[in-house]
Image (tube, grey):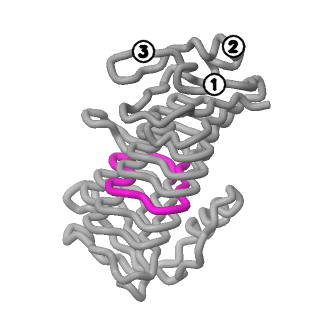
Amino acid sequence: MSLELTLKQQVSIPLEVDPIRLETVRELSVDQIKKLTIFHGNKQPELGEFFDVKGSAEDQEMVWMGDCSKVKLIGTHLDAGTVRVEGNAGMHLGAEMTGGQIIVSGDAADWVGAEMHGGRIHIKGNAGHLVGAVYRGGRRGMTGGEILIEGNAGNEIGHTMRRGLIAVRGNAGDAVGFNMIAGTILVFGSAGIRHGAGMRRGTIGILGSEGSPDILPTFKAAGRTSPLFLTLYLKHLQEAGFEVPEIPTDLQKYAGDFLELGKGELLIPHFAA
């Protein structure tokens, strides 16, 4: 049986549950887990004050139940096993994780997978801003792993990402791949403006059919392409249980950002170019 943590009541001040990690709770009894301290504003209450606890994490699975949209740092630093959220998740989901997987049945807030290094996050609903991004003052965002979002996502997806894959089934906001160092971002819907600003390497695909996205003047048209790697990525996503929409095989490529190294690529459907 999995370890189940069920939120007793909604809170106006967010809860920070960074101390509740799989490697911490795996060897503990239910009563010991309830006594672990979390953060609630400037207080450090016991977990049992806000959550009902039952089951065991011996099988390497933890389940957060209820509307946890005000519960921050679920799955942070995860290195193995599975964390599931049966509902919504708060900010910093899976931040700095190195392995394992996180599955969210609802929506997630900002900073999903911030500075993550490995593993997989799969969100069945929408995500907020700064998915896979670098924290303010940091040097690199996401450096490995995968973030799969079946709904929409906000602004600055992949801000300063260095490696890994971010896939968004729906639409995205502005500045996809801002300051991107490398990696791959695929948006299967439409997106806003200023994509790839400051990017050095990597691939950004804005693959929806709702008109041409904004192209910065520091990008140059680099011909039409049907990249093989994209076919391989789509197959990989399907095998991961991520529904992939049909996309055009004839794509227009733009190279940039020529204010930086200029070795990045932006791919959009040719008919929208």
Circle 3 sits in a helix, a strand or a loop, which is it? loop
Magenta span of residues: 146-165
Dots 2, 1 in contact, CB < 8 A: no
How far apart in space, not on screen, are marks 3 and 2 (Cα)? 20 Å
Task: Give the residue pinned by disc 1.
Answer: 22
Task: Give the residue pinned by disc 3.
Answer: 44
Amino acid type indicated by mark 2: Leu
Against 109, residue 194 (above or below) is below
- Side (left or right) of 30 relative to 247: right
Which marked residue is nearer to the observer: mark 3 or mark 1? 3
Amino acid type indicated by mark 1: Leu
CA neighbours of label 1 inside 10 A, class few (<14), some (14 to 19), many (20+): many
Q: How many marks on residues?
A: 3
Which marked residue is nearer to the observer: mark 2 or mark 1? 2
Query: Which disc, if any, is residue 28?
Result: 2
Amino acid type indicated by mark 3: Gln
Circle 1 sits in a helix, a strand or a loop, which is it? helix
Q: Earlier in the sequence, mark 3 or mark 2?
A: 2
Which marked residue is nearer to the observer: mark 3 or mark 2? 3
